Amino acid sequence: MKKLLLFYARECPHCRRMLPLVDRLETETGVVLERLEVWHDEANADLMRSYRSVIGPKCGGQLRTPTFLNTETNDLLCGEVDYETLKAWALR
Amino acid sequence: MKRYWRCFVCNDIHVGSRPPEVCPTCRVRNAYVEVTAAEAGIIAQTTTASPPPDMGPEAFRAAIEAFAAPNVFRVSPDEDRVQLLLEGIFANERKRGLKYCPCRLTTKDPAEDVKLVCPCNFLAHDTWLESGACWCGLFVRR
């Protein structure tokens, strides 16, 4: 089953900019992203690390935030994107 | 593998695979001799006349400004961004021991994670090459 994860960090400026777009996406489309803060929650951090082999190749070899991940298809976005790109990812 | 070196003139300690050709403090050429990590630690502590105070956000800000000054990059002019990043960097230092970038998660592999300490080697990263900024945006091209 498709599950959309957002790995973000509390003090990450990219994440701060993307969170309002996520709010808008959820309101407009009804999709729900599971928001997982990774620098202050070790369980979330370990979950992100468990996807390292998926995230790394598409994110400069690193676990960058924010990362948007579809756990069914491993389709992901890394960093700041515009609303339409985010929406297209979420609805794929 | 990094090794420890001591300047036989001024007792500066250098950590690296090779010693500096010229000591940056006393300017003596070929002055470095290899020492153990234990020796290096003791010498570094006992020869520091006025040990630097704990480096808080203000001192770190001054350090990275000085670091950037002679380079092609500068600290971001976006003050809100800088303050948020400093908050994250110091939160990470308190919790994880080092000033890790707040925009990249550690992997638990020490050799990998040391690459995330701010300032990182961002000039080699895709984001610098593509957008002229480090990943978190703390440093931007002038």
Image (spheres, grey):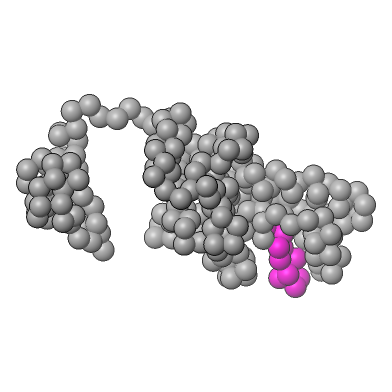
Is B23 within the magenta? no
- Place of residue A69 in the rendered image (x, y in percent of width and height, measured from the top left): 72, 63
Side of A55 relative to B21 (left or right): right
Q: How many marks?
A: 0
Considering every residue shown, the one lying at the far bottom of the view is A73
- Place of residue A2 in the rendered image (x, y in percent of width and height, measured from the top left): 81, 67
Of the pair B138 and B87, the residue shown nearer to us: B138
Side of B108 relative to A84 (left or right): left
Q: Residue at x 78, y 56 (%)?
A: A82
- Place of residue B100 in the rendered image (x, y in percent of width and height, measured from the top left): 48, 47
Residue B104 in view: no
- Place of residue B60 in the rendered image (x, y in percent of width and height, measured from the top left): 43, 35
Q: Residue at x 47, y 31 (%)?
A: B57
Q: Residue at x 33, y 27 (%)?
A: B53
Q: Quadrant of the N terminus of chain B?
A: bottom left
Side of A32 relative to B40 (left or right): right
Above or below, A62 relative to B120: below
Q: Residue at x 20, y 57 (%)?
A: B3
The region drawn magenta spans A67-77
Side of B72 relative to A52 (left or right): left
